[in-house]
Image (cartoon, rainbow, N blue to C red):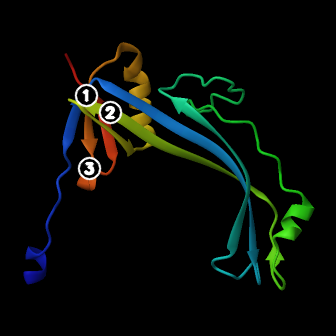
């Protein structure tokens, strides 16, 4: 019983705002795994090669975008150059095997919002990004649900007038 009393629950706080911007940073990165044995080593060393990225804002097509929108409404940069065999071998340490170059797609979502004179930028998720994309054209007020210690935005809901 004493262990249960030590447990404290942190409630999520909320904020209502009409000033907001959601971003989705889309990126492609070439990476190669290196290990003594690529099939059995649980944590191979990963080398990163070329990366390209594109910043999506509120669902609007970014300047210079040519790839997209995809099935999530995101625009993507052009592919970075694939590492050559020479580049892969150059980073290979003695006795290690080099894997094949892999193209990794990544998206990082953030929401910047203002309440009073304060402006905050916090990590968020796809669902919040999409809600902002729908609300942004009309500048509809949103109620934001913040995560633990107000370190992220977990939910965004339109405020009914």
> Up-down: is 65 above or below 112?
above
**Sequence-first tag of 1 and 3:** 1
The residue that appears at 69% across and 36% down in the rendered structure is 77
- Residue 136 percent location from the top left of the image: 39, 21
- Residue 149 percent location from the top left of the image: 24, 55
- Specify the quadrant that holds the N terminus: bottom left
**Callout 1: helix, strand or loop?**
strand
**Callout 2: helix, strand or loop?**
strand
- Residue 79 percent location from the top left of the image: 76, 41
* Left or right: residue 11 compared with residue 134: left
**Sequence-first tag of 1 and 2:** 1
CB atoms of marks 1 and 3 within 8 Å: no
Tell me where residue 113 sits by quadrant. Answer: top left
In this view, the residue in front, 84 or 160, is: 84
- Specify the quadrant that holds the C terminus: top left
Question: Which residue is label 3 attached to?
Answer: 150
> Up-down: is 74 above or below 140?
below
The residue that appears at 12% across and 76% down in the rendered structure is 4
Per the model, the C-alpha gap separating discs 1 and 2 is: 7 Å
Q: Which mark is residue 17?
A: 1
The residue that appears at 81% across and 70% down in the rendered structure is 91
Q: Which mark is residue 113?
A: 2
- Residue 114 percent location from the top left of the image: 28, 31
Residue 1 visible within the image? no
> Up-down: is 86 above or below 76?
below
Tell me where residue 115 sits by quadrant. Answer: top left
* Disc 1 residue crowd, few under 14, some 14–19, many 20+, Cα 10 Å: some
* Disc 3 residue crowd, few under 14, some 14–19, many 20+, Cα 10 Å: some
**Callout 3: helix, strand or loop?**
helix
């Amino acid at each position: 019983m004493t262990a249960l009393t030590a447990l404290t629950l942190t409630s999520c706080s909320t904020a209502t705002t009409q000033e907001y911007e959601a971003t989705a940073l889309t990126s492609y990165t070439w990476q190669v795994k290196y290990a003594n044995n690529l099939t059995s080593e649980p944590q191979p060393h990963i080398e990163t090669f070329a990366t390209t990225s594109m910043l999506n804002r509120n669902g609007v097509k970014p300047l210079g975008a040519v790839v997209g929108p995809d099935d999530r409404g995101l625009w993507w940069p052009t592919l970075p150059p694939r590492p050559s065999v020479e580049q892969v071998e150059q980073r290979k340490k003695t006795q290690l095997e080099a894997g094949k170059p892999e193209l990794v797609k990544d998206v990082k979502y953030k929401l910047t919002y203002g309440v009073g004179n304060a402006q905050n930028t916090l990590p968020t998720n796809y669902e919040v990004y999409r809600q902002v994309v729908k609300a942004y054209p009309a500048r509809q007020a949103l109620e934001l649900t913040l995560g633990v210690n107000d370190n992220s935005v977990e939910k965004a809901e339109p405020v009914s007038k």
